[in-house]
Image: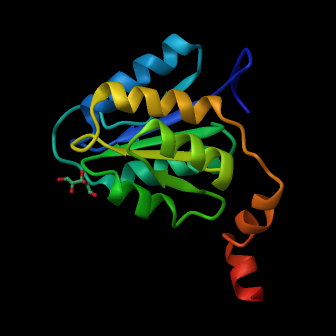
């Protein structure tokens, strides 16, 4: 997996409604020392959010990035699209508390936020919390395992 020093690589994507927040998040990631795979979009022209969710999730699933960050207007469409990928656990969050807890409890590997919902400073706090928080394991392992399609069909 591509890494810069000890900082994991992060893939990031947005639609037109998330483009401005994505730019702020990508800049912060670079400043923190992460390798950033910016998979678009590159402006405010109207695009389809699933295209960018799929690109980011493929990067995470294939090991080109350890984490993904997705931004659309609400974060909802991105999170729905992302969670269709096996092995992707995408959490839609609006603050640092949610970002911390989804890493600790859900082992989330993709963070979704809404550019029309969350301001830049709370979003940056959420991003920092997401990246700084390890998965707790323990009692959560059984529950996270049940998120996979194989466990669901074996139920
Ligand atoms: C685009 O207008 C908007 O629908 C999209 O950014 C997102 O919020 C969808 O969930």
Q: Residue at x 41, y 39 (%)?
A: 95
Q: Is residue 93 above or below residue 6?
A: below
Residue situated in front as seen by the camera: 150 or 58 = 150
Q: Residue at x 38, y 32 (%)?
A: 123
Residue situated in front as seen by the camera: 85 or 130 = 130
Quarter occupied by residue 89: bottom right
Q: Where in the figure is residue 15, as x and y percent of width and height?
A: 28, 44
Number of numbered tags placed on the structure image: 0
Q: Where in the figure is residue 137, as x and y percent of width and height?
A: 80, 51
Q: Where in the figure is residue 80, as x and y percent of width and height?
A: 42, 64
Q: Residue 90: in sight, yes or no?
A: yes
Q: Residue at x 76, y 46 (%)?
A: 136
- Give the left or right position of residue 101, taking residue 117 as reference: right
Quadrant of the displayed image that contains ligand 1? bottom left
Q: Is residue 73 above or below residue 76?
A: above
For the C terminus, which image quadrant?
bottom right
Quarter occupied by residue 13: top left
Q: Residue at x 43, y 47 (%)?
A: 93
For the N terminus, which image quadrant?
top right
Quarter occupied by residue 100: top right
- Give the left or right position of residue 47, taking residue 79 as reference: left
**In the image, farthest residue toward the right:** 138
Q: Where in the figure is residue 34, as x and y percent of width and height?
A: 59, 20
Q: Residue 109: in sight, yes or no?
A: no
């Amino acid at each position: 997996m591509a890494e810069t020093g000890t900082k994991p690589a992060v893939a990031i994507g947005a639609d037109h409604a998330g483009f401005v927040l994505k730019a702020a998040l990508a800049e912060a990631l670079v400043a923190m020392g992460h390798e950033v795979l910016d998979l678009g979009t590159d402006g405010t022209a109207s695009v389809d959010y699933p295209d960018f969710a799929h690109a980011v999730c493929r990067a995470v699933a294939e090991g080109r990035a350890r984490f993904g960050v997705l931004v659309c207007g609400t974060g909802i469409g991105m999170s729905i699209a992302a969670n269709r990928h096996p092995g992707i656990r995408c959490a839609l969050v609006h603050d640092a508390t949610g970002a911390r807890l989804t890493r600790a409890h859900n082992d989330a590997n993709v963070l979704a936020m809404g550019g029309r919902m969350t301001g830049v400073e709370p979003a940056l706090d959420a991003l920092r919390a997401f990246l700084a928080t390890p998965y707790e394991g323990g009692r959560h392992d059984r529950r996270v395992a049940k998120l996979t399609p194989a466990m669901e069909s074996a139920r």
